[in-house]
Amino acid sequence: MTQIKGSKNILLTLFLIVFADMVGFGLIIPLLPYYAKQFGATDILVGFLSTVYPLGQIFAAPLIGRLSDKFGRKIALLLSIGGTFFSLLILGFARSLTLIFISRLLDGLTGGNIAVAQSYISDFSDEKSRSKNLGLIGAAFGLGFILGPAIGGFLSKWGFSVPAFFASALAFMNLINIVVFLPDSRPAADHKKVPYTFEELVKTFSQPKVASLLFTRLFYSLGFTTFESSFTLFAIRRLNLELSQTGFVLAYIGVVLVITQGLLVGKVAKKFAEYVVIKYLMPLAILLLAVYSFSSNLATLVLFLTPLSISSGLIGVSITSLTTKSVSKDKLGGTLGIFSSADSLVRIVSPLIGAIVIQYVGSRFLGVVVAIFVSIGFVIFRTKFLPNLATMTEHTTI
């Protein structure tokens, strides 16, 4: 497979698109409970509001990903970012709780832009540079999510609608960026050859290596997302950390992940295949997850979380890169959309799992539970994916 001419410019454009999108996302998420409370939302409704977006993505991400396979990545990105733009306008003008819910549902139902961006990168990246390029997009994701809440908090001084309008302006800039600077990554003639059917996705996931990667990713994400979503509660219960200390740790983890995905992934990918990274780093991550929650002070916690964050960054990109190499390009968007759906499902259930563990089992055992989840994913990877590794090259051609 050859790289598209000007692939560096395309990568920069995609980096900026994902970065701006995640800044906008990070602007809104922390402010939603406050915004909803203005219109009389109960605690239960606020909790349900946080599930509307991932619920929409569960259904929409595979469809938009498959749309990108059939009609092109550019059209799919325009649809996804366009939906975000209109949803944020609705949020900014919202004067009722109903409109806030509609805004989040619309954003979720047109979500899937990250999967499409990953498919875009896989279209023009050769196998040697794919992990590096996917890592850069992951860094844009993390960097945007770090800066977004800070910008949103500052803008909220002038009202909760101001961050929404600012985020919508970022989405509109992204639309212009896509139209002007982003070529479609697949020739129009290729689109006609791709059937837009659910049966095609079923056939794809009937392949043992693809199905095994999906369940590896599902349990890996379940473990790490439970760790992330429950961290603040863990910090309060186990270490009695103040809000500023918890914020520091979370920001530190984010910076480590950005550096890992932006700089370290490319260097590691030059020396080691993705399956090697997963094979050796996932057991390390399992060990670190199992012991971090026994930390008795902040210094020990940071000592465990540093290698854990590095391992997590490398493993996540490696799983995505392996996925892109396990299916043909005309099924790539739909496949990554399914993986995105799995992540959305995990984001719904993981806060509840973490809270139950901390409440009824104890905060010090939270790490053991999440380590068990990741261990299940690792067992699936070792027993189901690796034996099928030899047949993977059959699906890396155009």
Image: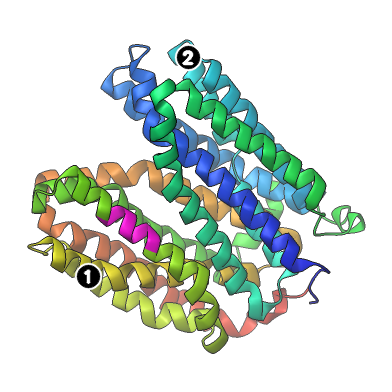
Find residue 75 and report its horizontal and vertical position in percent.
Answer: 78, 44
Q: Tell me which residue sits at (21%, 46%) in the image.
A: 244
Residue that mark 2 sits on: 98
**Rendering quarter of residue 28:** top left
Closer to us: 33 or 262: 262
Residue 254 magenta: yes
- Do the numbered discs 1 and 2 sit on residues whose CB atoms are within 8 Å? no
Q: How many marks?
A: 2
Find residue 38 and report its horizontal and vertical position in percent.
Answer: 35, 14
Q: Tell me which residue sits at (58%, 73%) in the image.
A: 131
Closer to us: 117 or 261: 261
Which of the numbered marks, if any, corresponds to residue 304? 1
Residue 41 magenta: no
**Rendering quarter of residue 84:** top right
Q: Residues within 10 Å of mark 2 (few under 14, many from 20)?
A: few
Task: Kindly give the residue lying farthest to the right in the view shown.
Answer: 189
